[in-house]
Amino acid sequence: MAKLIRYGAAAALVLFVAWLIFSGRYRIELTNGYRLSRLNRHRVTVTETLRGDYPVISGNVEKYAVGTPFIVGYASTNNMPADTNILAGYFIVNTDSRHVLQGLSEDHWKTELARIHWRSVQLEKVP
């Protein structure tokens, strides 16, 4: 009976570790209390830690870059429910003022980047 309990506990531990590994949740600290957070297997967003990891980008973040105090990138509707109100496109988050621009076309995004004096952006793919 003791062996059965030990094997059961070991199996439960293995399942728990597998769940942790494959659940897909992670957080990457960005700047000024903002994170890149994987909310589930299919959705990654920028969250604000001051509001309890509140999502500030409505879409699925695919690419991003950080230049304090700004977080910029591209969010899509990939893997998102069809019935949600999602602003796909480029985004800019000003972490100092908490102002968010999202759903921008590439041209509008580049205009806004020039306005904040960000001339060259290398977007990284979300891990």
Image (cartoon, grey):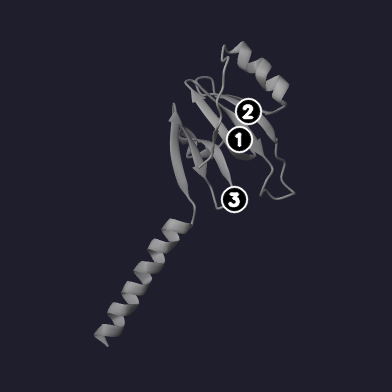
| Place of residue 11 in the rendered image (x, y in percent of width and height, measured from the top left) | 36, 73
Is disc 2 in contact with disc 1, using a CB cutoff of under 8 Å? yes
Q: Residue at the location (64% across, 36% down)? A: 75
Q: Earlier in the sequence, mark 3 or mark 1?
A: 3
Viewer-side label of 2, 1: 2
Classify mark 3: residues with Cα within 10 Å, few (<14), some (14-19) or many (20+): few
Marker disc for residue 57: 1
Give the quadrant of the N terminus. bottom left
Q: Is residue 23 above or below residue 8?
A: above
Q: Is residue 98 left or right of residue 7?
A: right
Mark 3 → mark 1, Cα distance in angstroms? 14 Å
| Place of residue 3 in the rendered image (x, y in percent of width and height, measured from the top left) | 26, 84
Viewer-side label of 3, 1: 3
Q: Is residue 7 above or below residue 104?
A: below
For disc 2, the marked residue is 91
For disc 3, the marked residue is 42
Marker disc for residue 1: none
Q: Secondary structure at mark 3?
A: loop
Amino acid residing under circle 2: Phe
Quarter of the image for residue 45 reads: top right
Amino acid residing under circle 3: His
Q: Residue at the location (67% across, 48% down)? A: 80
Amino acid residing under circle 1: Ile
Q: Earlier in the sequence, mark 2 or mark 1?
A: 1
Q: Secondary structure at mark 1?
A: loop
